Amino acid sequence: MEKTNDKTRQINVLERFSRLQIMSALAGRLDFFNKFGWDNYNGARNLFNALGYPQIIRYRDYYNRYSRQEIAKAIIDKPVKATWQGQGWNVQEILEKEGNEKTQFELAVDELKKQFKLRSVFTRLDKMVGIGKYAVLLLGTNDLVTQDSWSKPIQKSKNLKLIFIKPYNENNAQVNKTITDPKDPRFGLPLNYLIGGKDIPIHWTRVIHVVDEVLDNELEGIPRLKAVYNRLMDIEKISGGDAEMFWRGARPGYTGNVDKDYQLTDEMIDDLEKQLDEYEHNLRRFLVNEGIEYKALAQQVADPINHIDIQLQLISAETGIPKRILIGSERAKLASTQDTQEWKELIQNRRNTYATEMILRPFLDRLIKFGILPEPKNGYEIVWEDLFLLSEKDRVDIGVQRATALKDYTSQPMSEGIVSPEAFLKFFLGLSEEQLSQITQMQGTGLQSPPNIQEE
């Protein structure tokens, strides 16, 4: 009995120590958040409190801002849409082969893309990851016989097939348990999840966990709106204040000066108040009174564009999205060449790192591991469409400019004496060595005359 009491006391001591650790951690976090509000003047002023910025931002706050604010939505949507647009990604099995025939693995991936509309699914998943700290992709397979099957790991099988895939945001996909065995390669990672408000734990093999901007926590990234959240609030204040200022200032207030020799009765005051009330609510467009002179107050409407522009510059600096592309000026052909180049580099890098390594490879590797996709013998690579390839319109425009330059060059008798034709083609028209070689061959071969066509 004494031994049991000693053991009980030991457990109680451990429990108290654990509570103390939790309280210490909470106190540390509270102190961090207070300091994060940027105390000034020896703690006399907290900028976050003074400016109305929240100390803690929750998922619902991010989601509401994404849903209701234009710039917040653009910060999330524009990189995502640009990443998965066009031909997007393709998978090639790494083989030394001749010809363009696709392997069984490549054909299976192509069929998967069509069947499950993967571009749409990954676009939704990418947006969810950006709004919160993470998002998950739920894999539904044909081995799910009962509800309890969700809690069991997927077993590799030739008959295993993918039935559905569905993305869930952070708010609807919570980590239920993590692996606590330090000898397990997945130590600290999820064992199972609670998804879609159901109480049935779902085994990690059925879930692809996606994060972005990871620092010290492998399971939670930094929301894409977090660093610019204060700036988004400032834009809301400025634009909303501007609208309110215009609303109130566009219809100015009035002052009424009563003539010194005129006496207002109670009935006249009641009638005046009624008229003013109708005027304020747009039921009356004029006032009828004697002995009162009305004067409009001066309007005070300021231009907010410079103030908003500063916020946009700061947002652009943090997100890497050029300001003109962020606000949509590229549609009006106002985005500079440098902006376009930086934007393409951002998206190309985003494709090769985040989209490939955090979404596509984990998804494909999981399907290969359990036999849903055939295993490539020598691995595979993910190939993205080259964003820097010239469009058909760009090629036509360049052709027109080169033709005009060539016409001007050949029309001047002294041109060849100043610059040789080869130098003109290479340095002024920017043709490559391969293109110059092809031109030389064509000149040597000559153009064949078209066949004679006789009318019947």
Image (cartoon, rainbow, N blue to C red):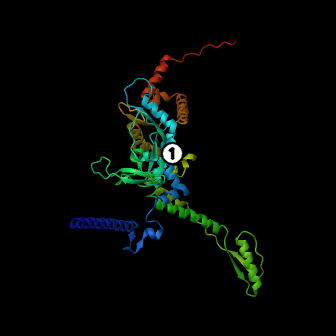
406 sits to left or right of 45: right
Asked if one can make out residue 294 in the rendered structure from this viewpoint, the answer is yes
**Image position, residue 361 (x, y; %):** 40, 40
106 sits to left or right of 237: left
**Image position, residue 60 (x, y; %):** 49, 59
Quarter of the image for the C terminus: give it. top right
249 sits to left or right of 334: right
Q: Residue at x 44, y 48 (%)?
A: 136
Tell me: residue 326, above or below residue 258.
Answer: above
Q: Residue furthest left?
A: 3
Amino acid type of the residue tagged 1 in the rendering? Lys
Element at badge 1? helix
Q: Residue furthest front?
A: 1
**Image position, residue 283 (x, y; %):** 74, 69
Tell me: residue 241, above or below residue 216.
Answer: below
Viewer-nearest residue: 382 or 139? 139
Tell me: residue 368, above or below residue 322.
Answer: above
**Image position, residue 21 (x, y; %):** 30, 65
Asked if one can make out residue 264 in the rendered structure from this viewpoint, the answer is no
Viewer-nearest residue: 71 or 343? 71
Viewer-nearest residue: 282 or 19? 19
Task: Count every numbered label the image shows and give the total.
Answer: 1
- According to the picture, the residue beneath numbered tag 1 turns out to be 81
Tell me: residue 144, above or below residue 57.
Answer: above
Q: Quadrant of residue 29?
A: bottom left
